[in-house]
Image (cartoon, coloured by chain):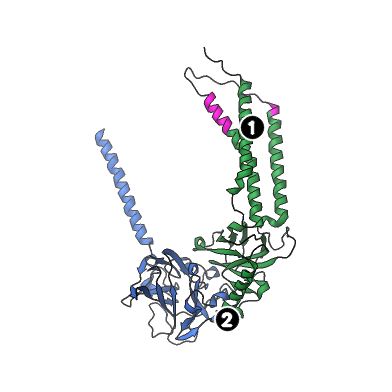
Chain colours: A green, B blue
Amino acid sequence: MATPAPKRAEHGKRVIVGGIVLSVVATVLVAVFGGRFLPPGNGSVQASGQVLDNTVMLAIVTPVIAGLLVFFIYVLSQFRHRGGALVDGPPLRDDSRVRVWWIVVTSVTVLFLAGFGTFELLQNGSGGGQGPDPIAVPAGTKLPVQVIAQQWQFTYRYPTYGGLETPQLVLPANTYIELHVTSLDAIHSFWAIELGVKADANPGVDNVAFVKTKGPRTFHVRCAELCGLWHGYMFNNGRVVPEAQFTAWVKSQQSDFAPIAKYLPKYSTTYYPDPQRRAG
Amino acid sequence: MRATGFKVLGVAVGLAAAAVLIGLYVSKLTTDNGSKAYTVPVQTQGGHKVVDLQIETVAAVGPQFSPAHPDYVSYLVRDAQGKWLRRTVWRLPANATVHMTIYNFDGASGLRNPLYARPQGIDGNSFMLDGKATDFINPDDTSHTFAVPAYGLVVPLTGVADNAKNQCGYAPCALSMAHHTITFTFHTGKVGHYRWQCFVPCAAGWIDGFGGPMQTIGYMDGFLDVI
């Protein structure tokens, strides 16, 4: 004796219950374990904040994906054509309750994300470039470090150490860094991947970003803006080191670059080198 | 019916062959000699690989080396027979010592970033400029740099004075013409493909001095193909 086909309302209940069960399990898994696998890692306070943001967004989208998966699998299994004549399905009718729920759920989700994102940004800038007049300025002492982009290498200046300039980026651990990002020629973008910092480097513009380092580690720096022939090769490694090691490194760099120190321009937030000077 | 099929097949094969031939011809036209690799001869001293690499920098590469862009500023490399070649991809052995000699025939352009007037990444962070040990030059006197960023290597090249006699117009430039000789030593590391470039915006007439020869392998850019 054949099992009677479920009624239409039962299909809906099954999909909803299945979707809720899968959503709860998957969302809990994402919330607990997701952060371990999401970029950019745990290299700075801002990077950890971005992992939290990514985890929240993934957790919010997880029920949507779970609901779609359950619906998709259920529909494929229940409404397959099993022989016989092809006939039209029952007509679809408007349901105002579905509409209301749809508007409420999506509006609350979007408004929550807008509020959450704004809160996160205003805390410390989340590692993003904020332009010359940053809105989110973290409290406390900060070490200023200037990032100078040029085709095709980043160099770094330390104004509190006599304007030292070096091709290496070394930062002290557990310190708030105030990055001033600029360019001498084309548009570049400074991306310290594991530190969660990304800021455009534009000529004549001082783009400020904040990052608080954690413990010693290495990190990758890349240019994230197509800037010419060697854009793909415009990268280097940076280091976060203990305070004492940082001080020793500064001294060694000051010694290495002492011969050229007098030729460096006075520290400035931007530079306008003559772009057309050319003999030949 | 079968004859028609063979005709269609014949036309398809013919079109495919024509496309391949056109592709090869276009490839030949567009492949620049400068991007072909030059294998630098290797010597062995006490079991260690040593390379003697000689290059020259010229204000204009000239029609002999680049009919398409005779006015491009360029580097040339000298082969074992003493002949200058416009090749900027140099094949070098890994973990070798490279004794480099650069003959610079170009005038001073000035550095955009004075930091590169300080040599880095070479033995002693010092080079010989016309036989004199030098650990920095005036950034305004810089004509070009030879830089391999992955090695942290930068060497600034002093430009020929504007009023120097017997200046070289087009490459190849004879050593009897006005020039500076820069020599230094560096070491290749592990196998890899390392770009080298000039940090002076020396492309005359291009926006910011960084177009044309500065954006084209075969002139002011190339690779160390370390094998």
Kindly identify which numbered label has been placed on residue A259. Answer: 2
Tally the marks: 2
Look at mark 1 in the image and give the residue it sits on: A20
Q: Residue A130, located in which quarter of the rendered image?
A: bottom right
Labels 2 and 1 positioned on one and the same chain: yes
Q: Which mark is residue A227?
A: none
How far across and down, in percent of the image, does residue B162 sit?
50, 84
Q: Which segment did they paint magenta?
A: A69-97
Which numbered disc, 2 or 1, marks the residue closer to the eye?
1
Q: Is residue A218 left or right of residue A162?
A: left
Q: Would you call the spot at circle 1 few (<14 residues within 10 Å), some (14-19), or many (20 or more)?
A: some
In x, y percent, where is residue A151? Answer: 54, 67
Q: Earlier in the sequence, mark 2 or mark 1?
A: 1
Q: Is residue A77 magenta?
A: yes
The residue at 69%/42% (across/down) is: A110
Which chain does tag 2 point to? A
- Give the amino acid at mark 2: Pro
Asked whether A57 or B15 is in front, the reply is A57
Residue B53 x/y as whole percent: 38, 75
Q: Amino acid at mark 1?
A: Ile
Dividing the image into 4 quarters, which one contains the N terminus of chain B? Answer: top left
